[in-house]
């Protein structure tokens, strides 16, 4: 081997070492950079006709634990869903009132009971009758109304937020589609793809906060997204994958069957129930299950309270037409739905508080 050849081999080794050191410096400098992953520079021996010609540095490759990354995205999805759920439920808790100050629904019902106990000592006293009707009973209805309004508002916000989140998902899927094409093009040309793959991981991380997905990288660099609800999610470079219409929600509106809440469509197919995890999955659960259940519990409590008084001959509570829903009917589709938002002190009793003693109707 000539001296020139030996020097060239030594030079190639030094260059490879220099690139490896530079890569190590980049790893340290970017340790706190969001989305940056540790890179490695691998050397490859170069030879021709069984004669060694030195070493060649390959492009930087990522040192990533795919299983750990997928688990992190899964936890990110669960965390985003939990934060959204906590935010909504905390607002429900606020609407209930602070028990420490005696403003809760149970507190108002207790005060109503106490006012009736006080009235029992002198049933004919108008001042005490007014205290029952104009204060205690009124506060009970206002608390029911406030809670029902809060639940309805949060349910509407869940749907409106869902529309916005679907738009964010579409934008992220387009970004993933563009990045995937970049990986394929660079990979086909033999160029390094580590930087683009870092950006892909960031995009998938953002997507995971909205919707739990499992990314699968194929041998050719292609990118496949699987939703945990059992759907394969396309990643086009343009256009929208998902769509959801705006809608005004009321206590009686619901999704599914002949319900009027529009579905989430993926390329024209209803995939609402298959969107699981993240803020989108939690928004659907809040809108279609959690908040309607709260509404039903409020409505049934309001109906039972009004019916208990009616059964004793005093229609103290009613809706605006003076009627009380039948608590013996199934809740769904009955007049009980939304009653917590309609309950009020019966107009007849408000105009004549003496009815507290005389009653409003004859009972057996």
Image: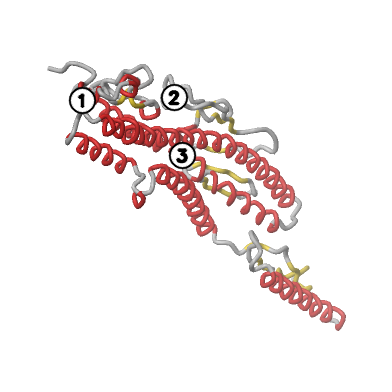
Instruction: Name the image quarter holding residue 21.
Output: bottom right
* Residues tagged 1 and 3 counted as in contact (Cβ below 8 A): no
The one nearer the camera, 146 or 221, is: 146
Dot 2 crowding, Cα within 10 Å, few <14, some 14–19, many 20+: some
Q: Secondary structure at mark 2?
A: loop
Position of residue 210 measured from the top left corner of the image (x, y, whole percent): 54, 44
Instruction: Name the image quarter holding residue 136.
Output: top left
What's the distance in space between the residues labelled 1 and 2, CA to CA? 40 Å
In the rendered view of the protein, which quadrant contains the N terminus? bottom right
What's the distance in space between the residues labelled 3 and 2, CA to CA? 25 Å
Dot 3 crowding, Cα within 10 Å, few <14, some 14–19, many 20+: some
Quickly name the residue at label 3.
229
User: Among all residues in the image, which is located at the extreme bottom?
Assistant: 3
Task: Tell me, for residue 253, which label it has, or none.
Answer: 2
Position of residue 230 measured from the top left corner of the image (x, y, whole percent): 47, 38
Q: Earlier in the sequence, mark 3 or mark 2?
A: 3
Quickly name the residue at label 1.
357
The one nearer the camera, 271 or 56, is: 271
What's the distance in space between the residues labelled 1 and 3, CA to CA? 59 Å
> Looking at the picture, does residue 335 appear above or below residue 300?
above
Instruction: Name the image quarter holding residue 152.
Output: top left
Position of residue 64 measured from the top left corner of the image (x, y, whole percent): 58, 62
* Residues tagged 1 and 2 counted as in contact (Cβ below 8 A): no
Position of residue 6 measured from the top left corner of the image (x, y, whole percent): 82, 81
């Amino acid at each position: 081997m000539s001296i020139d050849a030996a020097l060239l081999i030594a030079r190639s080794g030094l260059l490879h070492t220099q690139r490896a050191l530079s890569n190590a410096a980049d790893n340290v400098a970017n340790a706190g950079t969001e989305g940056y992953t540790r890179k490695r520079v691998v050397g490859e021996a170069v030879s021709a006709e069984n004669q060694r010609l030195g070493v060649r540095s390959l492009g930087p490759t990522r040192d990533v634990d795919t299983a750990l990354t997928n688990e992190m995205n899964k936890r990110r999805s669960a965390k985003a869903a939990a934060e959204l759920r906590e935010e909504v439920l905390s607002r429900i808790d606020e609407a209930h009132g602070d028990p420490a100050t005696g403003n809760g629904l149970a507190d108002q019902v207790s005060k109503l009971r106490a006012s009736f106990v006080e009235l029992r000592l002198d049933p004919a006293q108008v001042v005490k009758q007014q205290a029952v009707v104009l204060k205690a009973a009124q506060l009970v209805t206002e608390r029911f109304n406030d809670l029902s309004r809060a639940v309805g508002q949060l349910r509407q916000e869940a749907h409106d937020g869902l529309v916005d989140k679907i738009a964010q998902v579409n934008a992220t899927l387009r970004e993933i589609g563009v990045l995937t094409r970049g990986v394929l093009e660079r990979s086909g040309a033999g160029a390094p793809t580590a930087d683009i793959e870092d950006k892909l991981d960031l995009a998938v991380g953002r997507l995971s906060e909205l919707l739990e997905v499992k990314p699968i990288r194929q041998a050719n660099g292609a990118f496949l997204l699987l939703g945990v609800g059992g759907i394969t999610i396309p990643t086009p470079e343009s256009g929208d994958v998902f769509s959801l219409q705006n809608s005004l929600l009321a206590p009686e509106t619901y999704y599914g069957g002949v319900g009027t809440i529009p579905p989430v469509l993926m390329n024209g197919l209803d995939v609402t129930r298959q969107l699981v995890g993240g803020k989108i999955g939690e928004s659907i659960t809040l809108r279609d299950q959690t908040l309607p259940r709260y509404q039903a519990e409020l409505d049934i409590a309001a109906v039972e309270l009004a019916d208990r008084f009616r059964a004793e001959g005093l229609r103290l509570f009613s809706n605006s037409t003076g009627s009380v829903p039948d608590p013996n009917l199934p809740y769904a589709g009955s007049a009980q739905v939304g009653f917590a938002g309609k309950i009020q002190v019966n107009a007849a009793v408000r105009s004549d508080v003496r009815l507290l003693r005389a009653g409003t109707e004859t009972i057996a």
